[in-house]
Amino acid sequence: MKGIVFTEFFEMVEERFGFEMSNQLVEDTELKSGGVYTAVGTYSHHEIVALVVKLSEKTEIEIPKLLNVFGHHLFGVFVKAYHHFFVGVDNCFDFFKNIDNYIHVEVLKLYPDAELPKFIIEEEAENKLVLVYSSARKMSDLAVGLMEGAANYFNETIDIKKEMISENGENVRFILTK
Amino acid sequence: MHKELEAIKKVLIRERLARKQAGEIIEKKSLELYNLNQKLLAANHQLEEKILERTKELQEKNLQIKSNEERINLAIESAGLGVWDWNIEKTTFFTAKKLLV
């Protein structure tokens, strides 16, 4: 998993819960990397899962909620760091359509080893978009947070319905309506 | 406060290690790019040389064809002959001026 996910996770933890929490999290979680992350590196996705699970234990906030808040945070970072992906896009549906066929193509040029989720468009209309999320990382709650962040960015209100395609959470259908 | 300071120190140590790790990753990537660039330059050079070689070959062949043509024309003219060629597929017809008279 891309390093930026880890560095931003810790930034969010430090902002919201402080440095003590951030340090405790690393000390109490078994991490191959030792909790040392850089945005240009790639690390096992098991580590982010372990960190989120531990943060949930410590803060008593449910994992889906934490992932959702993290999604919102991460989207804010993406807007600042990768502004060029937003040029000429004025609504979130168009942005979501760009994820697989443009944004992830560009990401892979820089990071050929990146493991990226797939967002396949199943159905599209003016006020409706059906996306199928597929990722072995099973982080559809993070994807929801990111999509909500995108809708906020474009000043839109969308309703997101989740349908589990596979029980393990690797394949999820999102039905988005405006 | 003391506990927070301790935590910040540990976070800082990890940040420093991360910075070093980032430096190493970027250096490694830079080196990879440099080596790839060198390979591309060498390949480019090779291609240019090949083009020069081929161009020279073509020029020589063209000269050969021209002098052959001259020789044939001379032979035909001095023998007082005329030639024609009809390509049925392409529907083109070639003939020596002499035959048109």
Image: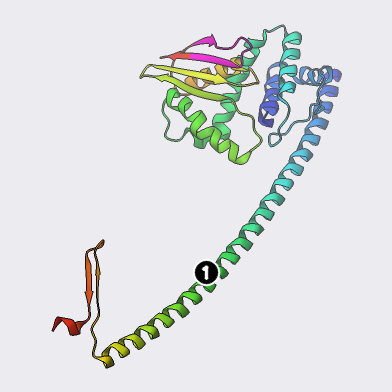
Q: Give yes or no for residue A126 being in the magenta stretch.
A: no
What percent of the width, then of the height, locates residue B84?
A: 23, 76
Q: Quadrant of residue A78?
A: top right
- Residue name at image x 36 percent, y 88 percent: B71
| Residue at the far bottom in the pictured view | B78
**Residue A28 seen by the camera:** yes
Quadrant in which the C terminus of chain A appears: top left
Q: Quadrant of residue A33?
A: top right
Disc 1 chain ID: B
Q: Residues within 10 Å of mark 1 (few under 14, many from 20)?
A: few
Quadrant in which the N terminus of chain A appears: top right
Q: Which residue is mark 1?
A: B51
Q: Quadrant of residue A65?
A: top right
- Residue name at image x 46 percent, y 75 percent: B58
Instruction: Name the one closer to the observer, A67 or B98.
Output: B98
- Residue name at image x 27 percent, y 91 percent: B79
What percent of the width, then of the height, locates residue A51?
A: 74, 18
- Whether residue A42 is situated above or below residue A20 in the rendered picture: below
Instruction: Judge from the rendering whether residue B86 lies leftward or rightward of residue A122; answer left or right.
Output: left
Q: How many marks?
A: 1
Q: Give yes or no for residue A167 being in the magenta stretch.
A: yes
Instruction: Identify the magenta region.
Output: A161-174
Amino acid type, residue under disc 1 in the picture? Ile
Scheme of colours in the image: rainbow
What percent of the width, then of the height, locates residue B83?
A: 25, 80
Is disc 1 placed on a helix, strand or loop?
A: helix
What percent of the width, then of the height, locates residue A2?
A: 67, 30
- Residue name at image x 77 percent, y 38 percent: B21
- Whether residue A125 is situated above or below residue A163 in the rendered picture: below
